[in-house]
């Protein structure tokens, strides 16, 4: 997906999303507040208020419009207090759309230790296991540092996510899957990083999915304006066409920003 035009062209970001985010944030960098936990959004009056805590201090910001882009899992957990509470239609959609339980493992090797085919993008162990891995080789698109990353899921992986040995356990199982494919002599990675999206209170899951039996327009309802266009919910879960994706999140934010701009011009 071309993030600028919305055309369905595949693109690859060899340095990850960081340069993209840094570029978009540059004009407003001095207005971005990080490590701030939003506790309340009050949109009762014409001037809305957002309260957050940082370093033990509570602060309230005021504005005509509020765009909430937290993951669906955070909304489902009621981590933010809305005053008044969100309309019943929104709360129904929040509960009816599913939040996926999945994580990623990133594994880095020394260049001399590469054992996988450089021209193969995807591979996986087809043996039925309690943790399933789908390995992706970004080196098939660029010549960066040798690494593999994998999506993994399974009830076992979810159940141990909050345990202290989670990373060691998942790393060992990922290496078992790789050795089943490439032999027992392959070396261990020099560095491993594993996400904990399900246990993370600021994500509470990976990305949204359509539950069986759910209404077709659930996401459209979720993304619609609230209280005379003072409050908007945005993010991949509100994108009817490209949910579950980064470009879906981007396009939803772009569309919501346009709605706010149009509202200000009236």
Image (spheres, grey):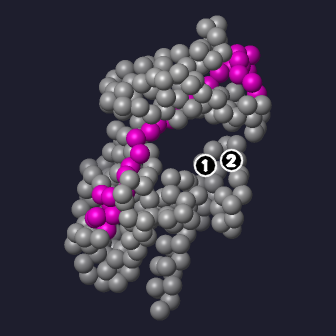
* Mark 2 crowd level (few <14, some 14–19, many ≥20, 10 Å Cα): few
Query: Where's residue 72, x and y in %?
Result: 38, 55
Q: For this rendering, which residue is in front, 55 or 150? A: 150
**72 relative position to 264: left or right:** left
Is residue 230 at least partly visible in the picture?
A: yes
Q: For this rendering, which residue is in front, 187 or 57? A: 187
Residue ID for mark 1: 17
Residue found at x 68% / y 68%: 5
Q: Which mark is residue 115?
A: none
Residue found at x 64% / y 11%: 183
Query: Where's residue 153, x and y in %?
Result: 45, 34
Q: Real-space Cα distance between discs 1 and 2?
A: 7 Å
Residue ID for mark 2: 13
Quadrant housing residue 58? bottom left
SS for tag 2?
loop
SS for tag 1?
loop
**95 relative position to 238: left or right:** left
Quadrant housing residue 230? bottom left
* Mark 1 crowd level (few <14, some 14–19, many ≥20, 10 Å Cα): few
In the rendered view, tell whether residue 169 sits above or below residue 142.
above
Q: Which residues are magenta?
A: 90-118
Residue 24 is one of the magenta-drawn residues: no
**224 relative position to 49: left or right:** right
Instruction: Give yes or no for contact between labels 1 and 2 (Cβ–Cβ under 8 Å).
Output: yes
Residue 104 is one of the magenta-drawn residues: yes
Q: How many marks?
A: 2
Residue found at x 65% / y 21%: 109
Is residue 4 at least partly visible in the picture?
A: no
Quadrant housing residue 164? top left
For the view shown, which residue lies furthest in the left direction?
A: 84
Q: For this rendering, which residue is in front, 239 or 52? A: 239
């Amino acid at each position: 997906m071309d993030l600028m035009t919305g055309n369905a062209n595949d693109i690859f970001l060899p340095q990850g999303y960081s340069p993209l985010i840094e570029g978009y944030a540059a004009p407003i960098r001095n207005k971005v507040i990080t490590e701030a936990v939003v506790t309340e959004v009050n949109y009762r009056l014409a001037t809305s208020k957002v309260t957050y805590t940082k370093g033990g201090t509570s602060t309230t910001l005021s504005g005509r419009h509020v765009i909430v882009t937290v993951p669906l899992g955070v909304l489902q957990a009621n981590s933010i207090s809305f005053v008044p509470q969100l309309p019943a239609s929104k709360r129904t959609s929040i509960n009816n759309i599913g939040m996926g339980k999945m994580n990623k493992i990133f594994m880095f090797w020394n260049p001399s230790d590469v054992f996988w085919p450089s021209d193969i993008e995807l591979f996986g162990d087809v043996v039925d296991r309690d943790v399933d891995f789908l390995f992706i080789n970004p080196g098939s698109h660029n010549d960066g540092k040798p690494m593999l990353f994998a999506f993994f899921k399974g009830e076992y992986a979810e159940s141990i996510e909050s345990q202290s040995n989670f990373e060691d356990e998942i790393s060992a199982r990922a290496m078992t899957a790789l050795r089943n494919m490439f032999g027992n002599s392959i070396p261990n990675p020099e560095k491993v990083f594993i996400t904990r999206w399900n246990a993370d209170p600021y994500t509470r899951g990976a990305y949204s999915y359509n539950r069986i039996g759910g209404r077709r327009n659930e996401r459209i309802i979720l993304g619609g304006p609230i209280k005379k266009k003072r409050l908007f919910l945005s993010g991949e879960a509100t994108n009817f066409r490209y949910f579950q994706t980064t470009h879906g999140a981007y396009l939803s934010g772009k569309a919501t920003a346009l709605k706010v701009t149009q509202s200000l011009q009236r």
